[in-house]
Amino acid sequence: MSNARPAAQARAPGRAVAAGMGPFAIGSDGGGSIRIPAAHCGLFGMKASMGRVPLYPGTKDERYPGVSSWESLEHIGPLSRTVADGALMLSVIGSGPDARDRHSLPKPDFDWMGCCLGGIKSLRVAYSADWGYAAVDPEVRRVVGDAVKVFERDLGCIVEEAHPGFDDPYLAFWGIVALESDLRGLRAMVAEHGHHMTPHIVDFIMRPWTAEELTDAVMVRKAVTNKLWRFMTRYDLLLTPTLAVPPFQLHVQGPEKIDGNIVPPFKWLAFTFPFNLTGQPAATVPAGFSKDGLPIGLQIVGRHLDDPTVMRAAKAFETAHPWHDKWPSLLTSMGL
């Protein structure tokens, strides 16, 4: 891994695990925030199926504006250097329901550690490099494309390029966030503390959302979910880049251009947030590195509630394409 500064979104827990300060960390993922730092730090990260890991008080406590947001989007999960370490964490935090979380699922009928065993030969795998509409950095296309070949060449899967066929749901995603937020409480916070808050967050809170915008977001979510479950009747797994770009400099929301196209600040997240809308299990594994030595992630997505297949596929890929012995060059230069 390069000494170049990773993206600001590669948050402290991801950096700490990548540097070997601990075997794993917990992330919260409302639109990708387990998979984003994992991908940009060369780690495994997994957002299990919605409700697999109970969540309280985050998103649930109505007393605190902001904390009570994102209820149907947020997931808790592991960031780790190996798939087995992530499975070990999920065996504890994903072991059954909690009455405080109305979305939590019954105790799983599988063993998380057992999910790491076995191969994935003959699984039907779809690969979408860009959804048919997203701008993607050429190095990401190259590295992820090579990683996808491992599934066919080394793991015995039947791989085919295919897109689910939905339109970009980015605006609808933020409509769902607004719908689930305490806008009254957040606007009171802006009135008192807005000068300390990030401008794009203030803009989001103060936007005069209409009823039609909010219900349109709900309808788009239903359309995306329906497209994906129908698509997944033909495939066991869906592979995509985790992020559209390699890690970038600090103190920006995202690159201004991707593959020569001028893009809004968050378009590099095109592959993560759709699966918060659907609640499907989605993991990221290190696919490889850019020419500058920066980590690039491969996203592995399963059918609704099929966490075991995602975990097994991640472990199978790790075995065929190991990464746990790769450390930041700063550490290796220090003999650590």
Image (cartoon, grey):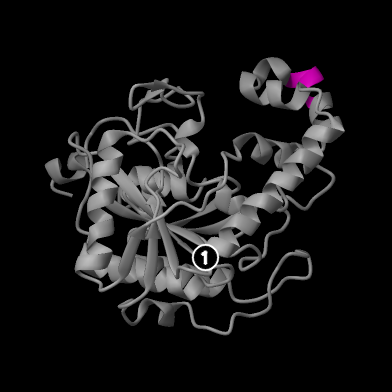
Q: Nearer the viewer, residue 110 or 128?
A: 128
Residue at x 79% of width, y 19% of height: 192
Task: Give SS at disc 1.
Answer: helix
* 42 versus 150 height, above or below: above
Report the amino acid beneath label 1.
Met
Q: Nearer the viewer, residue 231 or 323?
A: 231
Q: Residue furthest top?
A: 195
* Main secondary structure of the magenta stretch: helix
The residue wearing badge 1 is 232
Q: Position of residue 328 (x, y in %)?
A: 23, 44
Question: In this orientation, does residue 325 appear?
Answer: yes
Quadrant of the rendered image containing residue 260: top left
Q: Position of residue 57 (x, y in %)?
A: 73, 54
The magenta stretch is 189-193
Residue at x 26% of width, y 30% of height: 4
Q: Position of residue 212 (x, y in %)?
A: 83, 34
If the image is split into quadrants, where does the N terminus sit?
Answer: top left
Question: Is residue 294 found left or right of 28 in the rendered image?
Answer: left
Q: Nearer the viewer, residue 2 or 320?
A: 320
Q: Nearer the viewer, residue 327 or 297?
A: 297
Q: Position of residue 70 (x, y in %)?
A: 70, 46
